[in-house]
Image (cartoon, rainbow, N blue to C red):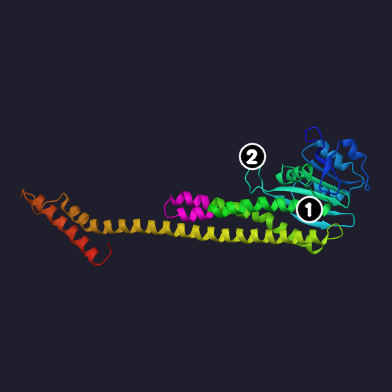
C-alpha cells in the first residue's frame, strides 16, 4: 500500500477493538459512512494522492485546501461535519534536524479519518504498527489521543537532549574553547526557538480541543487530551528555561572574553608606559647633531644601557608598588 504509485501510504478499516485490516483502493471507493471506521493516510507529494483527495465530493473544498496547504501551523477547527486538526512532530528522518518539525494534517469525521503528510512522520507509522498488532485505536477520538501521545513522546526526547546539551555546555564553558562553546550555545538557541515556534500553537490547539471536545471524544479521551496539553506546556516551560540558561551562558562567555581582551590591552598599556620614556631617551641620543654627550667616550654606550635599564626596572617597580602589575 505504501508504494510510490499508490495514493495511500496506509489504509485500514478499524474493527473498534484495537485491530483492523489493510484495505485496497477498491475497498476504499466502496466504503460508506455506515461502514467500519476508515483511516487513510496519504502523501501530498504524490499526484495520485492529491487527485484522490480532490475527487472527494463529500469533503468540503475548504477542508481539501487546508489539507493540501504548503505551510501550516498547529490548530484545531471543529465544524458540524468533523474536525480539522493540524499537528507538528519532530523530524526523525535520516539526516534531518529534529527542530525542522513535520506537519500532519487530519480531517476527522465520525466514521472516517483522512490524514496527510508531505514528509514522513514516525508517529503516524507507530499507529499503523499498533493497528496491525491489535493495539490500535478503536474510535476517532482515541486515534487523536494516540497520535498526540506519540508526538509528545518524541518531542520530549528532543527537549531532554537539548537540556543535556545545555548542561554539557555549562560544564565545559570553563575548559573548552570559548568560541566553540558560543557556537554550540547559539545553535541550541536556534533549535529551541524553532521548536517553540510550533509547540506553542500546538499547546493552544490541544487546550482548545479538550475544552471543547465535541461528540467524537469521550470523557476519558478528553481527559487524556488535557494531560497531553499539560505535557506540552511542561515542554514549553522547559524550553523557556533552556533559552534563559543559554542566554546567561552566552553572557558569561562574552563577559569572560571581554575581560580577557581588557587584560591583554592593560598589559600592552603597561609595557608601552615602561618603554615610552626609554624610547624618548634613545630618540634623543640618536639625533645626528653635534654636542651629544659621550660620543668620544668608549664607556658611554654601556652607561646609557645601564641607565635605561635602571629606569625600566624603576618604572616596573613603581607600577608594582601601585598594584598596576
On the image, numbered disc 2 is attached to which residue? 94
Instruction: Tell me the quadrant of the picture where the C terminus can be found.
Output: bottom left
Residue 252: say if magenta: no
Give the residue drawn at x 90%, y 54%.
Answer: 81
* Residue in the image at 50% along x and 53% along y: 168
User: The magenta stretch spans which residues?
Assistant: 166-185
Secondary structure under badge 2?
Answer: loop
| 74 to the left or right of 30 | left
Crowd rating for badge 1 (residues with CA inside 10 Å; few <14, some 14–19, many 20+): some
Q: Is residue 260 above or below residue 104?
A: below
Q: Is residue 206 left or right of residue 265?
A: right
SS label for mark 1: helix
Secondary structure, magenta segment, majority class: helix
Residue holding disc 1:
144
Q: Quadrant of residue 261?
A: bottom left
> In the image, residue 131 lies at what x, y percent?
79, 44
Amino acid at each position: 500500500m505504501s508504494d510510490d504509485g499508490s495514493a495511500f501510504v496506509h489504509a485500514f478499516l478499524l474493527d473498534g477493538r484495537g485491530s483492523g485490516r489493510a484495505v485496497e483502493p477498491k475497498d476504499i471507493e466502496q466504503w460508506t459512512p455506515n461502514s467500519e471506521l476508515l483511516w487513510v493516510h496519504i502523501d501530498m507529494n504524490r499526484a495520485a494522492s492529491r487527485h484522490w483527495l480532490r475527487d472527494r465530493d463529500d469533503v468540503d473544498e475548504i477542508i481539501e485546501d487546508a489539507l493540501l496547504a504548503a505551510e501550516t501551523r498547529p490548530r484545531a477547527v471543529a465544524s458540524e461535519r468533523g474536525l480539522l486538526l493540524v499537528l507538528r512532530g519532530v523530524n526523525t528522518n535520516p539526516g534531518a534536524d529534529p527542530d525542522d518539525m513535520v506537519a500532519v494534517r487530519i480531517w476527522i469525521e465520525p466514521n472516517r479519518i483522512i490524514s496527510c503528510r508531505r514528509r514522513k512522520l514516525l508517529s503516524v507509522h507507530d499507529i499503523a504498527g499498533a493497528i496491525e498488532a491489535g493495539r490500535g485505536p478503536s474510535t476517532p477520538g482515541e486515534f487523536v489521543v494516540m497520535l498526540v501521545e506519540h508526538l509528545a513522546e518524541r518531542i520530549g526526547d528532543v527537549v531532554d537532549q537539548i537540556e543535556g546539551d545545555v548542561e554539557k555546555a555549562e560544564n565545559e564553558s570553563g575548559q573548552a574553547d570559548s568560541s566553540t562553546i558560543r557556537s554550540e550555545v547559539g545553535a541550541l538557541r536556534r533549535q529551541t526557538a524553532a521548536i517553540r515556534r510550533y509547540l506553542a500553537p500546538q499547546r493552544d490547539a490541544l487546550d482548545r480541543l479538550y475544552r471543547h471536545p465535541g461528540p467524537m471524544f469521550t470523557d476519558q479521551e478528553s481527559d487524556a487530551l488535557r494531560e497531553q496539553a499539560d505535557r506540552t506546556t511542561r515542554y514549553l516551560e522547559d524550553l523557556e528555561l533552556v533559552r534563559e540558561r543559554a542566554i546567561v551562558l552566552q553572557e558569561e562567555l562574552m563577559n569572560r572574553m571581554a575581560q580577557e581582551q581588557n587584560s591583554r590591552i592593560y598589559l600592552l598599556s603597561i609595557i608601552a608606559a615602561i618603554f615610552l620614556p626609554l624610547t624618548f631617551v634613545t630618540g634623543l641620543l640618536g639625533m645626528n647633531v653635534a654636542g651629544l654627550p659621550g660620543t668620544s667616550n668608549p664607556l658611554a654606550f654601556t652607561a646609557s644601557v645601564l641607565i635605561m635599564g635602571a629606569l625600566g626596572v624603576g618604572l616596573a617597580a613603581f607600577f608594582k608598588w601601585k598594584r598596576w602589575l
